[in-house]
Image (tube, coloured by chain):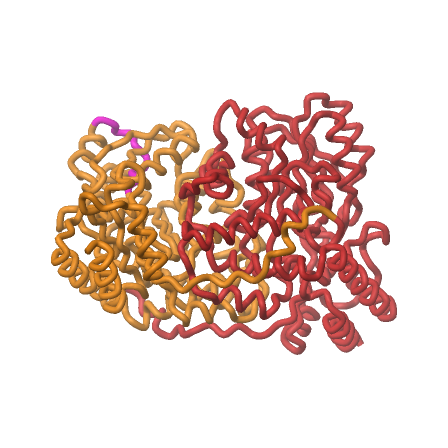
Chain colours: A red, B orange
Amino acid sequence: MKTDAHKRITSFMPPHRTLMGPGPSDVSQRVLDAMARPTIGHLDPAFVEMMEEMKTLLRYAFQTENDLTFPISAPGSVGMESCFVNLVEPGDQVIVCVNGVFGGRMVENVKRCGGTPIVIQDAWGAPVDPNKVGDAFKANPNVKVLAFVHAETSTGVQSDAKTLAEIARRQGALTIVDAVTSLAGTKLLVDAWGLDAVYSGSQKCLSCTPGLSPVTFSPRVVETVKARKAHGQSWFMDLSLVLGYWTAAKRTYHHTAPINALYGLHESLVMLQEEGLEHSWARHHANHLKLKAGLEQLGIEFLVAEPYRLPQLNTIKIPSGVDDAKTRSRLLNEYNLEIGAGLGDLAGKVWRIGLMGYGSCEANVNKCLAALGEVLA
Amino acid sequence: MKTDAHKRITSFMPPHRTLMGPGPSDVSQRVLDAMARPTIGHLDPAFVEMMEEMKTLLRYAFQTENDLTFPISAPGSVGMESCFVNLVEPGDQVIVCVNGVFGGRMVENVKRCGGTPIVIQDAWGAPVDPNKVGDAFKANPNVKVLAFVHAETSTGVQSDAKTLAEIARRQGALTIVDAVTSLAGTKLLVDAWGLDAVYSGSQKCLSCTPGLSPVTFSPRVVETVKARKAHGQSWFMDLSLVLGYWTAAKRTYHHTAPINALYGLHESLVMLQEEGLEHSWARHHANHLKLKAGLEQLGIEFLVAEPYRLPQLNTIKIPSGVDDAKTRSRLLNEYNLEIGAGLGDLAGKVWRIGLMGYGSCEANVNKCLAALGEVLA
């Protein structure tokens, strides 16, 4: 028998951190306990009933009546890719708004589907400019899809999803919207705003563990998928197959769902409805204001202009002369506090402080301000 | 605010089942407890250390020294698709052996990659015939990949992976091997047999919860991926990107790993090394023999000829005159016992009784035999 290296390995006992990065966020004991409940089969009638509840709860969170609303059995990146592989066929024109990492990843997705991306650039830290989107539609009348990020996790910026979707609808285009960081943390009204394909993640403002991607698709998306000339490039992400498992009267086996992870998401959605969506938005906003006041006292500046700041993800400039990596290391090792580094061009220049879901609470605000005060002193 | 239907939904309390279907299998309390440990960040040094341990433990389970051995953050179907999208480029010829559902799904994958499948059919319930594979290589000297299922979950058949891989190697072709149901339940020697791209699932003989797909790739696979003319069609499954997160000295963010699910898999792999791989294989075999003896006393016949039976998945013919759905319903509702239905052509004709991982124990054998004895009386 090969390899002896395994012999020294024992059970993994993670440290107890306070998670104030860009996600995963702190997970409540209720959600963790739910995940430890006994596993049942993915076609068990009790599980199918839970799936129905999950769809109802997600419809509430997304504020939609879309029938096709469910959690994809994989991380948010698969949620993103699922939107593109189902809607973008070779030759299709897609306007992609890039103002951070995740807009860039959308461009990559369009290319891999054989589509033609029409890229609109805005500065990292600025929102998407609707005027540029309007101009791009004028210059390209055959655009099929407008893709943009509602809440850019890499910069902490919120864009005006309602206005962007209106422009797309006027032009007869579909929208693909990244709501990974916005869902449950800030206002998101899928039906009222007319969004078509929207994906999110379990580990941000829903405060579930990472690994699931809630999605919702409008009837226009379902029609478009059904009208495709050829099926998409992915078997796993093909909505026409997934439909049979998540929405058909007689469930057909597609893949084995991640049962216990779904227990966790169900519980986090139950907690959301107990609190109420509007209260959740208000709580995120209130804790953001407390953090902001404390940061200002420390002389720390925000990257993003006030009207575009995400309350759940505060991107701040690293004070000059402060060592990025060393400071984050001290926070982690001495305070068990995780905050997020900058990505891409913002690496070394900013920190991202998350106040997401269960972690958006006064205790976390105070802990973070106290720790920052000490390490920056 | 929309939709009131969510208001009646409360925490989900699953029933306590005994899982003797084709997976998920019974999950031990140790694994469930591990999943409920506090979530930490996916770039936390403590988590990165756990990832290294995971790779070591998986190398032991797969019996390989392959550097690129890790769990994909999605179900086994994504493990399958990852093998194909990375290795099959448009125009490539792939011999696919089909003797059940999952071979059929491989054909679908080849097509979606733009490859040309050369399909070898064997009966559902029979193993792959190596002679047919040899003939197919003779008739098609430019075949790039041979793809086959080691342990067909839809039929309970084991094929001779060692011999099939030898044929492929002689022809200079790579192998893609489905080891979803075989890993840890029956002999699988990735390096000794010279297998190239092998994928499995967490919810079978590893007895973790569903949702992760352990994979291992030979150095030949890595070279092939690096030598590609164009990158593959999937962003999420692109090995050249995943490498940066799972194997680079400085970890680069790719996607947010399913932290708590990975705690569970880590624990199940620690349990496997405590028992020892060979003891695990022997236990699966011994419990299979006990079940077989009891089934024979009940006059029940196996679908598969004795030399090709999987000890961890026993496919038996439904006795004539017995109502399939009604009987499985009674087992579930009166005994909390889940056994598997037949798939595809075998629907209504067979049941699949799993004795996988933690669930391969004398108590489960006895429970199943007693329950079957009563409902069939």
**Image side of residue B48 versus residue B172, left or right:** right
Q: Is residue B141 magenta?
A: yes
Q: Total number of numbered labels?
A: 0
Please state the extent of the stretch shown in magenta in the rendering.
B139-148
Q: Is residue B139 above or below residue B41?
A: above
Image coordinates of residue B193 in percent, x first then y, are 24, 51
Q: Is residue B376 above or below residue B28?
A: above
Q: Depth check: B7 or A192 in front? A: B7
**Image side of residue B83 versus residue A202, left or right:** left
Q: Quadrant of residue A352?
A: bottom right
Image coordinates of residue A226 in percent, x first then y, are 53, 28
Q: Depth check: B341 or A154 in front? A: B341
Q: Is residue B56 above or below residue A307?
A: below
Image coordinates of residue B248 in percent, x first then y, are 51, 57
What residue is at 49 percent from the left and 46 percent from the top? B240
* Quadrant holding the C terminus of chain A: bottom right
Q: Depth check: B211 or A143 in front? A: B211
Image coordinates of residue B49 in percent, x first then y, are 49, 68
What residue is at 74 percent from the left and 48 percent from the top? B1
* Quadrant holding the N terminus of chain A: bottom left
Q: Is residue B64 visible?
A: no
Q: Depth check: B284 or B277 in front? A: B284
